[in-house]
Amino acid sequence: MRQILFFLAFIVCNCGISQKSEDGMILIPAGEFIMGKNTTTPSDWQPEHNVVINSFYMDKQEVTNQQYYAFCIATNNPLPQFWGLKEFRSGPDFPDYPVVGISYFDAEKFAVWSGKRLPTEAEWEFAARGGMTGKSFPFGDQIDSTKVNYGKIHKGILKVGSFPPNSFGLFDITGNVWEWTSDFYGSDYYAHSPAENPKGPETGRFKVIRGGSWHSGPMCVQTYYRNGLSPSWVDFAVGFRCVKDIK
């Protein structure tokens, strides 16, 4: 039954029926997928395990400088750490570039202000895989610099939507900038995580970031790769996108 529901939702998503909400989001269909990857060396992305995800909306692009600036003006929130620095494509001269220099707490505040939330780690990986099974990247098994901004090849952050989207219609889901998720990081969490809509450990020192960035090597832009940062940390290569529950 889950496979049938996934197939029908996938058809709806890809036929353009209610694919986008009114605010630039993509409908991610409900489904079941294999999260993580089994490798020969110990890692925090194993064991592979089946996960069921409910459908949700996700921003088709990373939150931009322009969008975040509007939030700061409306709420009197401080501007990002690197605002005005051209080397990080931050500030009013780069409205369509992903915002960086914001902490997890900043990202969460923006999400709440906009009527959304941050994705769980499982939602993020399910969306990044785009319905592809067993692939390391959103577009296949081989890295391709014409499809993802990584490894300093493009010498910095690029405008959102500079490459083709994945099969769910999401732009820059890997590469360009890392993305905050709502989960606390746990190196052994996959060994005992729930099978349906996991939300990460209840507590922790770090929050999970996903997707790698323009500054990352090819390993970090794989769909299963995980990392964690202090939620108060700000970085020149970390941004975010939001999700919204379907009512």
Image (cartoon, grey):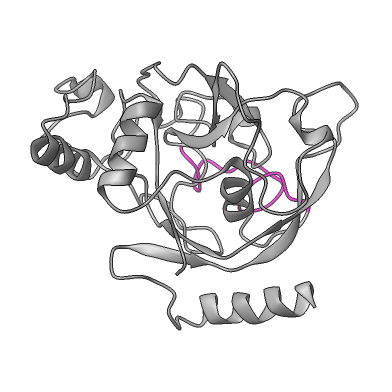
Residue located at (83% from left, 46% from top): 49
Q: Is 6 above or below relative to 24? A: below
Say left or right for 189 vs 22.
right
- In the rendered view, does 27 fall on the left or right side of 31? left
**Residue 224 placed where, x, y %?**
68, 39
Q: Is residue 31 or residue 89 the one in the foreground?
A: 31
Among all residues in the image, which is located at the extreme front?
202
Query: Count the marks: how many?
Result: 0
Relative to 224, does residue 13 appear above or below in the rendering? Answer: below
The quadrant of the picture occupied by the C terminus is bottom left
Q: Nearer the viewer, residue 1 or 68?
A: 1
Q: Is residue 35 visible?
A: yes
Horizontal side of 216 relative to 111 (left or right) equals right
Question: The N terminus is located in which quarter?
Answer: bottom right
Residue 155 seen in render: no
Residue at x-position 35% and y-position 20%:
236
Q: Position of residue 202 (x, y in %)?
A: 62, 30
- Is residue 116 one of those drawn in magenta? no
Magenta region: 134-149
Counting from the top left corner in percent of width and height, residue 48 is at: 83, 42
**Residue 103 drawn above or below residue 143:** above
The image position of residue 85, as x and y in percent, is: 18, 19
Residue at position x 62%, y 25% from top? 185
- The image quadrant that residue 11 belongs to is bottom right
Q: Nearer the viewer, residue 99 or 190?
A: 190
In which quarter of the view is residue 20 placed?
bottom left
Magenta span main SS: loop
